[in-house]
Amino acid sequence: MSLSKKLALLVFLGIFISTIWVTFFTLPFIDPIINPGFQDMTSLVKFTIIKLIIITILIVTPITLLIWFLLRVYVVKPIEYFNKITKIIATGNLGRKIEYLSNDELGELGQNINTMVKNLSTAFQSMATSLRSEKIKEKELQNANEKLKELDKVKDEFVSIASHELRTPMTAVKGLISMIFEGDFGSLSEELKDPLSDIAVSTDRLIQLVNDMLDTSRIEAGRLKFLLGDFSAGDLASEILSLLKPLTDEKGIVLETQPAAEKIYTDPNKFKQILSNLIGNSIKFTDSGRISVSFRVNGEYLCVCISDTGLGISREDREKLFGKFTQISTTQTGRPKGTGLGLYISREFARKLGGDLWIESSEIGKGSTFVFSSTRSGTAAAKKVGESLQMFVDMEI
Ligand SMILES: Nc1ncnc2c1ncn2[C@@H]1O[C@H](COP(=O)(O)OP(=O)(O)OP(=O)(O)O)[C@@H](O)[C@H]1O
Ligand SMILES: [Mg+2]
């Protein structure tokens, strides 16, 4: 029911009830005095009812209509108008105003609604402006990001091409030097032996550096290639140990290992590279004592532990060593120079192959134990590695 109908009903009921009250409860006591002709109650009641009907038709209805008309003009109409305008505003038309200029509460309500809509519109405008500038900034950031990505790609390509190009002549230099040492170009004079062996060492370092740069750029570009298969961990380790044995002998360090029959699912070259870097580090940072390589099975993984009695690493330095180009400066003096990429590359390799690499223990002056894990052949973990690296296996780069 509309507001106007409700008000009309209320006014009518109000006046009607008052009329009944006056007619039934007041008149019966006055009537005998005004109309003493009535002898019995029945004729008095009949007369009263007829009077009530006449009063209702002649007085109650016109007064109800008048009050309803006034209420409609001064209350209902403005409310209907407010309703209509606020509906338009609710659709988003914030330019629309309430043009009701009376001096009463309704006029004040209209003014308040106008102020509220004006404030809202200002707030929306400033929101829209800041959103627009945010959008512009986002676009600029996106563009900068795209440019950075492109630059990064160019850098990766440059490092990759430069490293490839450098590797070939350096390998040639290395080959030529060993030919000179072997006497392929005639006998070598004593004075030339020292500078030539320095050149050989520097060339080896350069080749190592170039290889590390190539590995790093492949890791970052996600272009590592893998050659996966089942291999005996002990056999792979023996190859590296026999290669590095002369270096430990030279330093008077004991290099010990234990047999390992366990088979692992891995890329043999990457496995050997990890082990070679870890043992190489131990040799570099150990002056006396021993380096031991041991194996332990841990669920689906085989852990290879490399322990040394070397310089050790402080707790604060441990995690940062796995970053690129990180070295502990105090341990470097007098050591063969490195690039600080070995641990980064080794951990990336270990993780890509489904395992991990971490420092298990280390104490300054007492030595360190590095561990890396590989998936054991036939395990679910090995299967998962095989599936996840499928697209990179034998991929040409
Ligand atoms: N066994 C270890 N004992 C003491 N310090 C170590 C040991 N292994 C690594 N470190 C420290 O961690 C640093 C980082 O090692 P990482 O193998 O990444 O680089 P590098 O050996 O210096 O150079 P690269 O391996 O690239 O030729 C080393 O420079 C050294 O300070
Ligand atoms: Mg190293």
Image (spheres, grey):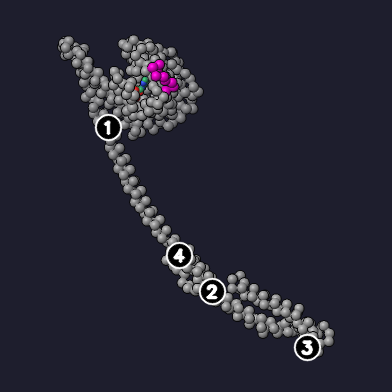
Residue closest to the far bottom: 37
The residue tagged 3 is 35
**Of 51 and 33, which appears nearest the observer?**
33
> Viewed as shown, does residue 12 lie left or right of 165?
right
Going by the numbered disc 1, the residue's amino acid type is Val
Q: Is residue 133 above or below residue 154?
A: below
Image coordinates for residue 109, horizontal then vertical, percent: 51, 68
- Identify the residue shown where x is 62% and y is 72%: 6
Q: Is residue 143 above or below residue 105?
A: above
Q: Which image quarter holds the N terminus?
A: bottom right
Viewer-side label of 4, 1: 4
Earlier-in-chain disc, 3 versus 2: 3
User: Magenta stretch?
Assistant: 359-368
Disc 1 residue crowd, few under 14, some 14–19, many 20+, Cα 10 Å: some
The residue tagged 1 is 159
Viewer-side label of 2, 1: 2
Image coordinates for residue 302, horizontal then vertical, percent: 46, 21
The residue tagged 2 is 77
Viewer-side label of 3, 2: 3
Earlier-in-chain disc, 3 versus 4: 3
Residue 16: image quadrant is bottom right
Q: Alpha-carbon distance for marks 2 and 1?
A: 80 Å
**Of 176 and 69, which appears nearest the observer?**
69
Verify CB contact (< 8 Å) between mark 2 and mark 4: no
Disc 2 residue crowd, few under 14, some 14–19, many 20+, Cα 10 Å: some
- Identify the residue shown where x is 28% and y is 31%: 160
Verify CB contact (< 8 Å) between mark 4 and mark 1: no
Q: Alpha-carbon distance for marks 1 and 3?
A: 124 Å
Viewer-side label of 1, 3: 3
Which secondary structure, mark 3? loop
Q: Alpha-carbon distance for marks 2 and 4?
A: 22 Å
Q: Which image quarter holds the C terminus?
A: top left
